[in-house]
Amino acid sequence: MTTQTVSTTFRPARLTYLALCLLLIACILIQVFLAGMGALVDARYFAVHKTFGDWFGLLLPMVAAALLGRFPRGVEPATVGLFLLYALQYVFFELGASLSFLRAFHVVNALLMFWSAARLAQAARLGLQDR
């Protein structure tokens, strides 16, 4: 298989992965906005924040696209790591019911998710340039 064939073979998965990364970044920004609305405007926005967060199913197709895209240098494990950061959002919030300081990590973890998604989008963009 030539380099050009590999690039052509994996390009659709890599484009899908990049699109999902960008969509996830947008969703995280919306989540931060909704949390801010809940904290600063009306607490009822926290219900919307929770519901919207429950729909972050984008991460499962991201893992599949990462595997199908055959990215170089650790994109697949980093994508799985991002999925684990998402799972930690629930852990921090729920454990915070008994250990309230853990809820603060919910916010810190959101920043880590944003940074990770941005770095993975950058890697995906570079992966599209591989020939």
Image: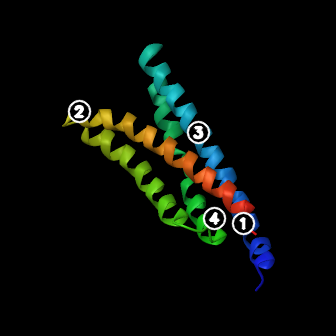
Q: Quadrant of the C terminus?
A: bottom right
Q: Residue at x 51, y 41 (%)?
A: 114
Mark 3 or mark 4, which has the lower sequence index? 3
Image coordinates of residue 26 in percent, x first then y, are 62, 38
* Residue 124 image offset from top left, x and y in percent: 65, 57
**Residue shown at 23%/33% (left/top)?**
101
Q: Amino acid at mark 4?
A: Ala
What residue is pinned by disc 4?
65
Q: How many marks?
A: 4
Farthest top residue in view: 41
- Which residue is disc 1 drawn over? 130
Give the answer, above or below, for where 42 lies relative to 76: above
| Tag in front: 1 or 3 | 1
Q: Is residue 118 left or right of residue 126?
A: left
Residue 27 is labelled as 3
Mark 3 and mark 2 in contact? Answer it, CB < 8 Å: no
Residue denoted by label 2: 101
